[in-house]
Image (cartoon, rainbow, N blue to C red):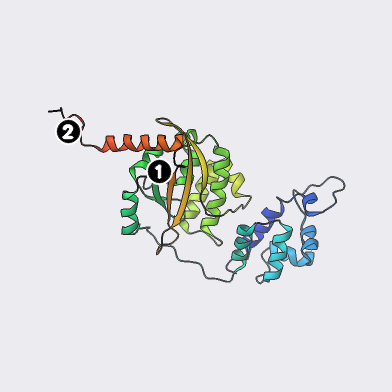
Amino acid sequence: MSDPRLLGDYLRARRAQVRPEDAGVVVTGVRRTPGLRREEVATLAGISADYYLRLEQGRDRNPSAQVLDALARVLRLDATAVEYLHGLAADAPSRPRPTRDAVPTGTAQLLAALDLPAFVESRRFDVLAANPLATALSPSITAGENRLRSVLLDPAEQALLPDWDWAVSGMIASFRTSLGPGRPDPETARLIDELTTRSEVFREHWSRHDVQPLEGGGFTMEHPAVGRLDLRREKLGVGGTDGQVLVVYHADPGTRTAERLALLGSLVAADQTPAALKSSPST
């Protein structure tokens, strides 16, 4: 295990999220500890309280897969969280991070050819490249911006998302999943420190250690030019990179959103048309 303290942090955060009654614990009197107590987790997992304490304190470096699975059951972890837990305990070297993220040429060409809003983001949710339709959807979807920072700190971005609270909680959980177990690289650590300092919402959700699958889903956007958009989001891994993802937004065919997305595309195309062609007189 590269850093057993990370496993302890995760176990403490997750046991605080489990209600005693959900774990079959009979509650009597006043409880000062949120969630489960250490000794309750140990008993339910079939391990000694002293051994569990050593895990939380980072003094045990070799928990078995059986112990981890037992703890996952007690802490009511889903499949993604179980995988994350095992990753925290894995004896694997830290993965080197590139100093720059270069989008592969083929992916950049595909991005430019798509007639749907699309962009490429890094493992850290930095926007590495975006097509004009994606930027028209949200000005913050542009190379050099960080999606998590924008959604958390930019009021204009927040105004686009009527379900902002729900979107943020999922995004932060996906961010932790994307980073994976282990200490973050210095640049990512600086981003986490910035968001922890500037956003109470980030501090609250980050302390929970939630993770969720890196997959697509639906969301709603209130666009100032074309109105309400009920969009689908697809995330496609870019091969040969350190976790780059191609993100594509689309709508169900024949819906009002599809019509409005097409309208936005025509506005973008018109804006990119040379001025001489826009004003050419008929002959």
Q: Which mark is residue 141?
A: 1
Q: Amino acid at mark 2?
A: Ala
Front: mark 1 or 2: 2
- When the figure is inspected, residue 62 is found, relative to residue 209, above or below; the finding is below
Judge from the rendering whether residue 177 lies leftward or rightward of residue 145; answer left or right: right
Q: Is residue 63 visible?
A: no
Say which element carries label 2. helix
- When the figure is inspected, residue 16 is found, relative to residue 52, above or below; the finding is above
Quadrant, the N terminus: bottom right
Q: What number of labels is visible? A: 2
Q: CA distance from mark 1 to mark 2?
A: 29 Å
Judge from the rendering whether residue 156 lies leftward or rightward of residue 203; answer left or right: left
Q: Earlier in the sequence, mark 1 or mark 2?
A: 1
Q: Amino acid at mark 1?
A: Ile
Query: Residue, x 87% and y 46% (percent of image)?
Result: 29
Crowding at dot 2, Cα within 10 Å, few <14 / some 14-19 / many 20+, comes out as few
Residue 4 in the image: state x and y as whole percent: 63, 65
Quadrant, the C terminus: top left
Image-quadrant location for residue 70: bottom right
Residue 47 in the image: state x and y as whole percent: 78, 67
> Residue under circle 2?
276
Query: Residue, x 35% and y 48% (percent of image)?
Result: 114
Judge from the rendering whether residue 16 lies leftward or rightward of residue 260; answer left or right: right
Query: Residue, x 69% and y 65% (percent of image)?
Result: 69
